[in-house]
Amino acid sequence: MPKYKLKTKFKKAVSEAFVKIMLPIILVIGGIYLLTSSNLGDGITSSTTESQDLSEEVLQYEDEVRKYAKQEGIEEHVDVLMALMMQESGGRGDDPMQASESLCGSVGCIEDPEKSIEQGVSYFANVLDRADQDIKLALQSYNFGAGFIDFVRNNGGEYTQELAIEFSAKKYEELEHTGKYDCIREEAEQYDACYGDIYYVNAVLDHYNGEEIQDL
C-alpha cells in the first residue's frame, strides 16, 4: 500500500479519535459557560432589578437608594430597602420612604423624594445598628419607632410576631384617646393592636427578592 494512503488513514484515525475525546469536553465546557453567563449576567444587574414585585416607580430610585445605603455602610441591604419603599408608598409621592416622622415627628415635612430616601435609609441604618443587625427587628422598628427595640430587649431579646402585637396593643391603649390611630388591618382589631402595622415585617418581605432573610 502506498505510503500516502497510510498517512491519510492515520490522520483520519487521529482526527476521529480527537473528535470522540474532545467533543464531549467542549460540550460540557460550553454548557457551564452558558449556565454561568445566564446566572451572572454582566455582573452589574442586582436581584433588585430582576424582581417582578417592585413597581417601576420604586425601581427608578434604585441608584439613589444604593447611593445612600453605601454612604451609611449598608449597601448589602439595598434589596431590603427597595422592598421597604414598595410597602411604604409603591414609589409614589414626594416622600416615597414615608420618612417625615423620623425626621421631624410629623407627616408631610419631606417634599423631595431624594431627601426622603436619604432620611429613610439613614433611619433604617440607625435602627438596624441598634437592633444588632436583626433585619426583622429593624424593619418593625422602622414602622413602630426605635422604642420597639427596647421593648424587645426587655422581653426575650428577639423579634417575634407576638411581641409586635403586644407592643402595638400597649401603645394603642396609651394613645387611643388622641384619635390619631385606627387599625389599618382588620386582623389587628381582635388584638386592639392598632398602633402601626403589626404585620409590617411580612408585608415588606413579600416584596423582597434577595437571599433568605435569616442569612442576612
Image (cartoon, rainbow, N blue to C red):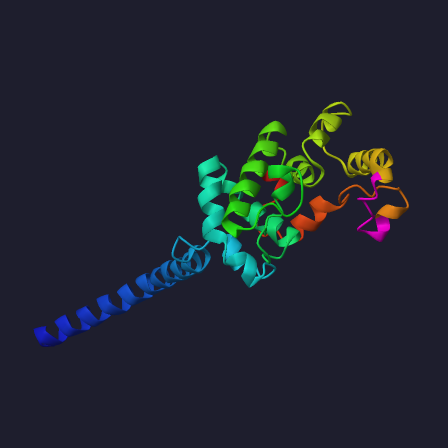
Front residue of 107 and 59: 107
Quadrant in the picture for the C terminus: top right
Residue pictured at 69% horizontal, 29% vertical: 149
Front residue of 133 and 185: 185
Task: Decide whether the magenta segment is chiefly helix, strand or loop.
Answer: loop
Which quarter of the picture shows residue 41?
A: bottom left
How many discs appear?
A: 0
Q: Is residue 193 left or right of residue 200?
A: right
- Of all residues, the one furthest to the top in this rendering is 154
Q: Is residue 59 left or right of residue 28?
A: right
> Magenta stretch: residue 185 in it?
yes
Front residue of 9 and 27: 27
**What residue span does the magenta drawing correspond to?**
178-187
Residue pictured at 76% horizontal, 46% vertical: 199
- Of all residues, the one furthest to the left in this rendering is 3
Residue pictured at 83% horizontal, 48% vertical: 183
Coordinates of residue 71 in the picture (x, y in percent): 44, 38
Which quarter of the picture shows residue 90?
A: bottom right
Q: Is residue 127 above or below residue 9?
A: above
Which quarter of the picture shows residue 5?
A: bottom left
Coordinates of residue 85 in the picture (x, y in percent): 60, 50
> Magenta stretch: residue 35 in it?
no
Q: Is residue 195 left or right of residue 209?
A: right
Q: Is residue 216 visible?
A: no
Coordinates of residue 22 in the picture (x, y in percent): 31, 62
Quadrant in the picture for the N terminus: bottom left
Coordinates of residue 29 in the picture (x, y in percent): 36, 58
Q: Is residue 179 visible?
A: yes
